DNA sequence: GTCGCGTGCTAACATGGGTGATCGCGCCCA
DNA sequence: TGGGCGCGATCACCCATGTTAGCACGCGAC
């Protein structure tokens, strides 16, 4: 149970006081739930009345068309929150499923509201969290719309590695990588067969070493260049702003 | 200057008191700015210190890769707001440009914060606005990732029509349609040539009549079926909930 | 053990969509 | 009045990616 993933994540945006960390740790300690691999956490059509915080494992958002085609919309890694304030909407328009065994904290909206009321700076932090996941969604649109299969998969790997790094889940040039080729295919809009071909290519160029559920990127700058990856959209490393520039903003919408 | 587009938009989610409408109208009256067609409103890298509300015309978010490939990420129609609370981030990771001549209201974040403070229910409404635009972004990912060119363009047309209808900008089965084929291509991840072919096909099947910057969809259910379009993700027609079910939620995060 | 099955991998073939180019029309402006 | 040019329409060609299918390995269930 990695209760500090959220804290590490938010530290990418701003520093936190001990009290603030305390509160976040409390949120992460809310009703925990374990989900088996390839099981659903919440399904399209369900009313969204809880916020999920991923503590352990990988999950994904996905959407299925009537005829069975399925698109993975996002990967949720430890430290990721699902849809703060999604209770405003009446039902989920997509599903969230576990990839590996996953542990989530199920947090009531009131709890988040209370935390924000007590520590207003957390509001900015949670907004940052929301805004970056929107930015990631946009980048995926670019990825699928414009990049070749080779760039597309390379880009996905760069992104996942960077995000894992942000929450301290990498070891040097390596990280755990539980995705199977079918899932990479679902995320990139390619077929599993073509993903396989393309992974061979990436291996052939020495850009990645992938096997046994472990990914190694020996030369990250080279892979980034080959994939047209620019990390700006992840909005990491924002430490600069303490977050108190305007007392108004934390009240603003939300 | 269609100052009421935002109001009509929000009415899809909840009813509004006269005072609330007043406030929204005031926001829409903030410093206006006119942008010529194909001009940029804000560019990647700029610090985002204003919220833009589209009053008139069509705009789009887009992102350009180093080598010039460009993806349109979203269309902004009258009544659309750009990134409430985006001031949390330090710089734009994409650009916003006008398609037609556009009029926007430039709203300071404090003004929005004040409005929300005075009328807390507006917070829920603005969250709804934000959440639906995220849902649209997700649907675009599905669109480009899974649908064929034919379905993809059909889907885009269904979406735009539904959104225009929500703000009262359709006439029967028709609406203004200022996009040129190159822009449709940029939004769908296709080439202009193939967009042209595919539009011919759609016309051939009698699904659309398009010309002279006017779109006519004579049989919407048929086009929706052909495009695997399901409007749920737009989260329109939510009138049901008055918005006062829990006093906590409007405080929550934001 | 061995059966089933999920997964990775490969090959042969099919095709949707990309490329590059040309043409015509309407509109703006010198 | 004529030239430029933005946009839509087509054509011929070709390649990236999809499709279908088959094999092999590893692992859990029995």
Image (cartoon, coloured by chain):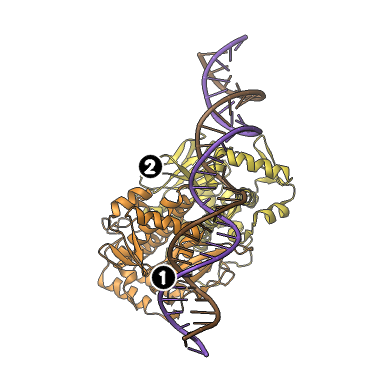
Chain colours: A orange, B yellow, C brown, D purple
Q: Distance between the Cα atoms at labels 1 and 2?
A: 31 Å
Q: Is residue B247 visible?
A: yes
What residue appears at the point 64 percent right and 36 percent down from the top-left corner?
A: B213
Name the residue nearer the viewer: A98 or B94: A98
Determine the chain carrying the residue at label 1: A
Q: Is residue A142 above or below residue C26?
A: below
Secondary structure state at the residue bearing disc 1: loop
The residue singled out by tag 2 in the image is: B66
Secondary structure state at the residue bearing disc 2: loop
Q: Quadrant of the C terminus of chain B?
A: bottom left
- Residue B185 in percent (x, y) is at 55, 42
Q: Is residue A160 above or below residue B213?
A: below
- Residue B1 in percent (x, y) is at 57, 40
The residue singled out by tag 1 in the image is: A58
In which quarter of the view is residue B233 placed?
bottom right
Q: Is residue B114 visible?
A: no
Are there few (<14), some (14-19), or many (20+) residues within 10 Å of tag 1? Answer: many
Determine the chain carrying the residue at label 2: B
């Amino acid at each position: 149970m990695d209760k500090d993933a959220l804290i590490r994540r938010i530290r990418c945006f701003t520093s936190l006081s001990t009290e603030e960390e305390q509160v976040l740790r409390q949120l992460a300690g809310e009703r925990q739930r374990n989900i088996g691999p390839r099981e659903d956490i919440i399904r399209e059509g369900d009313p969204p009345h809880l916020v999920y915080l991923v503590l352990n494992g990988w999950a994904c958002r996905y959407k299925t068309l009537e005829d069975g085609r399925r698109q993975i919309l996002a990967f949720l890694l430890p430290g990721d929150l699902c849809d703060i304030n999604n209770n405003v909407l009446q039902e989920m328009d997509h599903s969230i499923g576990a990839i590996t065994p996953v542990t989530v904290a199920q947090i009531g909206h009131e709890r988040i509201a209370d935390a924000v009321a007590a520590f207003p700076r957390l509001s900015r932090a949670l907004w940052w969290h929301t805004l970056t996941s929107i930015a990631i969604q946009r980048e995926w649109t670019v990825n699928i719309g414009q990049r070749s299969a080779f760039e597309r998969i390379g880009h996905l790997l760069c992104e996942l590695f960077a995000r894992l790094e942000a929450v301290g889940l990498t070891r040097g040039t390596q990280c755990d990588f539980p995705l199977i080729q079918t899932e990479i295919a679902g995320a990139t809009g390619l077929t599993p067969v073509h993903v396989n071909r393309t992974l061979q290519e990436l291996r052939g160029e020495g850009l990645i070493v992938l096997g046994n559920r472990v990914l190694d990127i020996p030369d990250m700058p080279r892979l980034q260049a080959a994939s047209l990856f620019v990390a700006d959209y992840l909005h990491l490393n924002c430490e600069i702003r303490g977050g108190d520039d305007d007392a108004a903003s934390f009240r603003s919408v939300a």
